[in-house]
Amino acid sequence: MQTSVIGFPRVGALRELKFASEKYFRKEITTEELKDTAKSLRSTHWLKQKEAGIDYISSNDFSYYDIMLDTAVIFGIVPKRYKKLGLSELDTYFAMARGYQGAMGDVKALAMKKWFNTNYHYIVPEIGDETEIKLTGTKPFDEYTEAKEAGFDTKPVIIGPFTFLKLARFTGEKKISDLKDAVLKAYCEMLDKFNRLKAEWIQIEEPYLVCDLTSEDIALFTGLYKELLTSKGNLKILLQTYFGDIRDCYEEITRLDFDGIGLDLIEGKENLSLIAKHGFPKGKILFAGVVNGKNIWKNNYGESLEMIGRLKQAADEVIISTSCSLLLSPFTTDGETGISDEILRHFAFAVEKLNELKELAVLGDALDYQGESLFKANTDEFEGKRAFEDKAVQDAVSRLNESDFTRRPVRAERASIQKEALKLPILPTTTIGSFPQTAGVKRNRSEFKKGIIDEETYNKNIFSYIEDCINKQQELDLDVLVHGEFERNDMVEFFGECLEGFVFTQNAWVQSYGTRCVKPPIIFGDVSRKGPMTVKYIKYAQSLTEKPVKGMLTGPVTILNWSFPREDISRREIAMQIALALKDEVLELEAEGIKVIQIDEAALREKLPLRKADRYSDYLDWAIPAFRLCHSSVKPETQIHTHMCYSEFGDIIKDIDNMDADVISFEASRSSMAILDDLQKAGFETQAGPGVYDIHSPRVPGTEEIKELIKKIIQKIDPKQVWVNPDCGLKTRGWEETYESLSHLTEAAKEMRGVL
Ligand code: GLN
Ligand code: ZN
């Protein structure tokens, strides 16, 4: 059996590309130096795969920033405002990715969006009426040739025309149907060029096929490929899908002239039954994604080989593949010295997954794989229970019933009780939680971690930051204050460290976008609360002021979504365990006199299943209850807030309302308040604070501008339901711009109160 890798992480084992790019942005290294780093990473990564014995290695999976952006540039889709800057090719590319502000002009970056159901973000290509689409870039050919010259036979990869068109943004009158032909022509030229380069295979990626498709979508897809495949010449074409199954178009796909079809057998729940039901086309190769490309756990060979056995009966040839690009997995477990072998032996990151592919291929060829020592070694890992079991937590979860998820009295009744208790003005003002993480704040934390300062000094410093933050908020005359989150590195890592059941790596970084990487904690055992997590900080903050200070917690769904979850129990079970731990913290905060508590669910929207049919059963049916569990037992007068980073929840508004929070804040200013109509239509009951200050930019919004936004809001939502706040936390901002922006925010709210 042979093996294939869809794509490999590109940032490097030690995030070399990130650091080199950042140096380049600061003009500390030259273009050539950056390109050299990139080149050496590419060859290191090809070599790793070759050494592991991978048969189908990808090229053009590398990117300086993002593959969608690369694809746009290859086809000449560069909006005029970037070309006009007159920068070098590479700098124009970075201007599209990150914006440009300097001697040559001032332009914002292209929009960035979440890549399907992952925490990776892609740059949204922008196609206007004047855009001329044609093959102008050479990156895929250059990288293919570079690999070949270095002794690596690769299959070049490219995002397919269907996904590309579906994800692009059309800024003018023209629609997909108007651009289809030009796009097709450019892709045909690309195939032609690869033919001339004598490439054997090309991997065309169409992840959009795993979303719900309309009949027009399917017609578009088949139309594109009927045409495209006529120009394949001697090339073999692998249609690669991932992140789900292709239930809407399986038969159409099997009828097209592809040479290989790549299916995700991990997340693609129905792919196996589609094959069983319709068969797999004769003479074609099935690239079977059985090694999970986006988790960190070892592959269970028993399960995989059984699957492979079934696939081999259906298809003439099966090649063992990752389920998606390994981009979404950390680099290697090598060097994770802080984790005991007992735990580490369960992990497989990108490099280790290569080895798994190879071992599966060897076992797949064996007459009796169950007798092989490779197989036995693997099954041993899955035998017996894991560490960190907590019977008490398991029992508590199994005892949960309806009343644990129901807060009394109903929201409207609570609202009037809270109004009495909190004595807030109309259009109350607040912030989302964090305040600037200054160099001093970061130094305090790193010196404590390194043991340079002791815990007492560390906390004393935190308390002084809190005091300063409370004073500033009082001066600004905000209504509901926060402590500022100076004890947190990250909103999930902090809680992970306070809770039982989490494991932390040194280097398990995963690219989130561009040069930004995240290092999600790993949930390894049953989760429970060791003791108070935030109480001393919030209590101290509250002791400094008469105004209410919000307790500030990260919600169960967000902690789960931004961690690597264990896979031996369900996500529901994990979410409930976390929720129970948070519930104790909520109740302790309340007992200590905290009257307002915010439970952030920044990442709730992000893991919503791609297909509508899976939304409830797979997710919302436990995610919303998990949130409710955290706050269902508080007193009626305690006000529960939540926060979400996106306002793209138009289609799950009822579910958001069902979280039964008293107040929600969310991003809205950048999306020009598009959500307001949806809220109005849905009769949204939760009090709402659509962000009126975009914290993602250092720009200071003026008072008038904020007033205009508030006016827009109160046209659509009853002013009694409206809060005034920024989009998100302020940790990435500087104090100066933050103070000025917030002073405009409170001023605008006061003037609007006067009007009301
Ligand atoms: N409370 C967090 C903060 O203010 C929320 C962050 C987020 O939504 N990403 O930083
Ligand atoms: Zn946010």
Image (cartoon, rainbow, N blue to C red):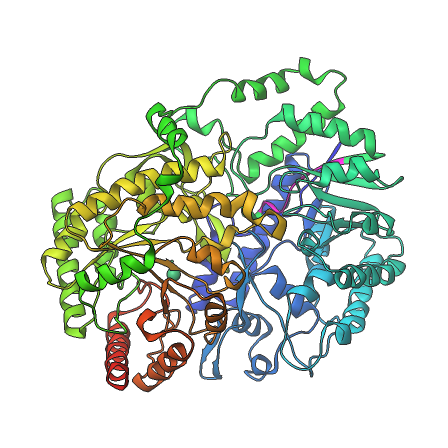
Depth check: give the residue in front, 613 or 603: 613
Image spot of residue 155 (x, y percent) = 74, 49
Q: Which residue is situated farthest in the top direction here?
A: 371
Residue 660 higher or lower than 375, as above or below: below
Depth check: give the residue in front, 50 or 755: 755
* Residue at horizontal 60 percent and vertical 81 percent from the top: 83
Q: Is residue 377 visible?
A: yes
Q: Is residue 725 visible?
A: no
Query: Which quadrant is the N terminus positioned in?
Result: top right
* Horizontal arrangement in the rendering, residue 398 relative to residue 89 (left or right): left
Residue 381 higher or lower than 42, as above or below: above
Image spot of residue 121 (x, y percent) = 53, 59
Residue 660 higher or lower than 665, as above or below: above
Figure quadrant of residue 373:
top right
567 within the magenta span: no
Image quarter where ligand 2 lies: bottom left
Residue span colored magenta: 319-326
Image spot of residue 369 (x, y percent) = 70, 18
